[in-house]
Image: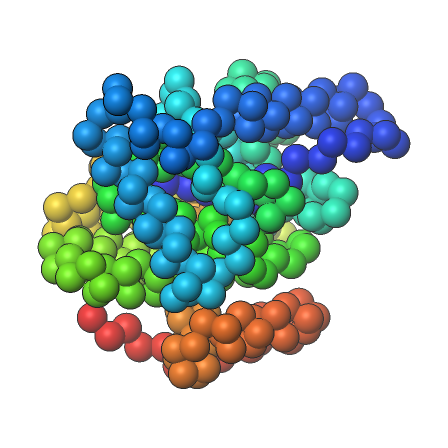
């Protein structure tokens, strides 16, 4: 899975947490984030450094312009985000672990103070993630560790810009900035799919307007191709998910061996269809370059980020493309209970038609 982001609220108050594993996890979270913050340099200082490379100078200038665009045009609560810059020593800032039962598509939920439960757990330390992955593997879960390009602290901290952003192509960097800032606008507990789909919708609609302003026809064409690849991949994933869900509902009728065999067949067919689909596009798709190996965790994670994107884009249209009104509508939607929210998002999705 490429170019992931996540919600990652670092909690400095550890009092009352129980267990060495819990304390250790929050310890690495606090230490990792504080280390990132302490290494930050003001972007403006970096820009005036005579040793700065032309490539980095261009990316930082574009990032600051995108930040202003997010505030002025997308009406996002930018605050002090992305005013500092950090050089990372690896291409990811954290890694995400996703764990899903072998015969289910419902991800394991990790619960935290204040922000509630999420369908992934983030680590600054890859070895910590692998140890936790091994624990779930021993219990028979399907697992996946994905490199995370960026994360949001929901406005609790001024998140820095870093090489996870600036090493991306310009249009991808801008899109990621919009995605992370969207998390500062609306966030609800216990609903990863809602939060990530909303941020992805803002990312897509924001990038569209950014590229139109920049008169970047080639960038817009690339963005449309990526969007088309994502949408077609989502169709394949949804079809496979329906098959898997129907299969898992037969656990009382079929033996475990039969369930596993049919599950493997469905996932292999999904991977084959994805490979054929990828031949039509010049850039790698959401699952990367084929051949790919997929399991319940891959499928569940992809759906978390994309399930309701059409619904939120339709809601923006329903509000006259006014982002302020759109955010208020999203906040109103977030106050509904989970069942009502899902019904409303499903109805919105069914009305959405892509205008390429």
* Image quarter in which the C terminus is found: bottom left
In the image, 275 versus 326, the foreground residue is 326
* Image quarter in which the N terminus is found: top left
How many numbered marks are there? 0
> Is residue 23 toward the left or the right of residue 257 in the image?
right
Rendered image quadrant of residue 87: top left
Residue 68: percent from left, percent from top:
39, 55
> Is residue 194 toward the left or the right of residue 90 in the image?
right
Residue 134: percent from left, percent from top:
57, 21
Residue 259 appears in the figure: no
> Is residue 156 toward the left or the right of residue 69 in the image?
right
> Is residue 253 toward the left or the right of residue 310 in the image?
right
Q: What residue do we see at 71% from left, 49% from top?
A: 116
Q: What residue do we see at 59% from left, 35% from top?
A: 121
Residue 236: percent from left, percent from top:
32, 57
Residue 159 appears in the figure: yes
The outermost residue toward the right is 16
Residue 322: percent from left, percent from top:
43, 77
Q: What residue do we see at 25% from left, 49% from top?
A: 171
Rendered image quadrant of residue 287: top left
In the image, 154 versus 332, the foreground residue is 154
In the image, 167 versus 92, the foreground residue is 167
Q: Is residue 354 above or below residue 197?
A: below
In the image, 1 versus 11, the foreground residue is 11
Q: Is residue 270 above or below residue 3?
A: below
Q: What residue do we see at 56% from left, 76% from top?
A: 329
């Amino acid at each position: 899975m490429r170019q992931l982001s996540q919600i990652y609220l670092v909690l400095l108050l550890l009092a009352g947490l129980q267990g060495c594993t819990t304390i250790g996890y929050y310890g690495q979270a606090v230490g990792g984030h504080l280390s990132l913050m302490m290494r930050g340099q003001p972007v403006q200082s970096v820009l005036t450094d005579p040793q700065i490379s032309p490539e980095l100078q261009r990316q930082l200038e574009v990032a600051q312009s995108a930040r202003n665009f997010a505030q002025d045009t997308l009406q996002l609560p930018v605050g002090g985000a992305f005013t500092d810059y950090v050089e990372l020593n690896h291409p990811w800032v954290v890694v995400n672990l996703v764990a899903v039962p072998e015969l289910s598509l419902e991800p394991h939920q990790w619960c935290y103070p204040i922000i509630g439960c999420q369908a992934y757990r983030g680590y600054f330390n890859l070895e910590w993630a692998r140890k936790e992955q091994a624990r779930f593997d021993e219990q028979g879960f399907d697992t996946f560790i994905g490199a995370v390009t960026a994360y949001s602290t929901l406005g609790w901290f001024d998140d820095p810009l870093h090489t996870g952003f600036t090493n991306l192509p310009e249009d991808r960097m801008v899109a990621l900035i919009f995605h992370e800032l969207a998390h500062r606008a609306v966030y609800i507990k216990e609903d990863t799919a809602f939060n990530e789909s909303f941020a992805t919708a803002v990312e897509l609609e924001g990038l569209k307007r950014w590229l139109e302003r920049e008169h970047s026809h080639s960038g817009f064409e690339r963005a449309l191709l990526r969007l088309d690849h994502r949408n077609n991949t989502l169709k394949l994933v949804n079809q496979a998910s329906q098959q898997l869900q129907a299969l898992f509902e037969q656990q009382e009728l079929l033996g475990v061996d039969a369930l596993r065999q049919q599950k493997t067949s469905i996932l292999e067919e999904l991977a084959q269809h994805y490979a054929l689909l990828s031949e039509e596009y010049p850039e790698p798709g959401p699952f990367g370059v084929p051949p790919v190996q997929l399991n319940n965790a891959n499928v569940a994670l992809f759906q978390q980020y994309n399930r309701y994107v059409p619904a939120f884009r339709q809601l923006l249209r329903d509000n006259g493309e006014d982002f302020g009104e759109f955010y208020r509508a999203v906040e109103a939607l977030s106050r509904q209970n989970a069942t009502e929210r899902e019904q409303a998002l499903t109805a919105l999705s069914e009305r959405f038609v892509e205008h390429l």
